[in-house]
Image (cartoon, helix red, strand yellow):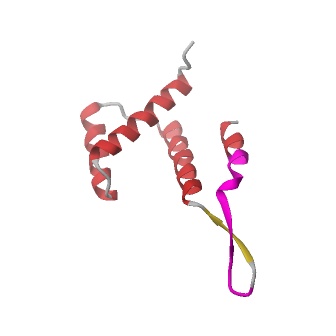
């Protein structure tokens, strides 16, 4: 249900682009790409699970951060936010 609501609410994230010959093509914005990436990542973790062994997770996140060119601190912060959101989905606060 969340995906459907998010998807329909974010249709504005596509911008028209005029190509040679005057034909209009819909181009995906960077914002929408990021939203889709987050939805896919959450779906993958829901399906595959999350490894919570701290030293292994930290090393994996650090290696991935270096591979994609972002800081380890930024990757850790993003990962923590993602994991907390997934835990809250699984065990909603009362």
Is 16 located above or below residue 52 in the figure? below
Quarter of the image containing the C terminus?
Answer: top right
Of residue 83 and residue 46, the one placed in the foreground of this image is 83
The x and y percentages for residue 88 are 52, 25
Residue under the image location 52 percent in, 41 percent down: 42
Give the quarter of the image for residue 61. Answer: top left
Is 13 located above or below residue 85 in the figure? below
Residue under the image location 55 percent in, 42 percent down: 43
The x and y percentages for residue 16 are 70, 68
Is 34 located above or below residue 45 in the figure? below
Question: What range of the chain is rendered magenta?
Answer: 7-21
Is 18 located above or below residue 39 in the figure? below
Of residue 5 and residue 63, the one placed in the foreground of this image is 5
Residue under the image location 33 percent in, 40 percent down: 76
Residue under the image location 28 percent in, 46 percent down: 72
The x and y percentages for residue 36 are 57, 51
Quarter of the image containing the N terminus?
Answer: top right
Of residue 13 and residue 64, the one placed in the foreground of this image is 13
């Amino acid at each position: 249900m969340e995906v459907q609501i998010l998807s329909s609410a974010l249709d504005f994230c596509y911008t028209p682009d005029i190509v040679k010959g005057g034909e209009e093509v819909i181009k995906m914005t960077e914002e929408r790409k990021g939203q889709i990436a987050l939805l896919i990542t959450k779906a993958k973790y829901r399906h595959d699970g999350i490894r919570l062994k701290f030293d292994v997770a930290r090393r994996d996140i650090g290696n991935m951060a270096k591979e994609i060119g972002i800081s380890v601190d930024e990757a850790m912060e993003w990962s923590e936010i993602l994991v907390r959101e997934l835990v809250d989905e699984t065990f909603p606060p009362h």
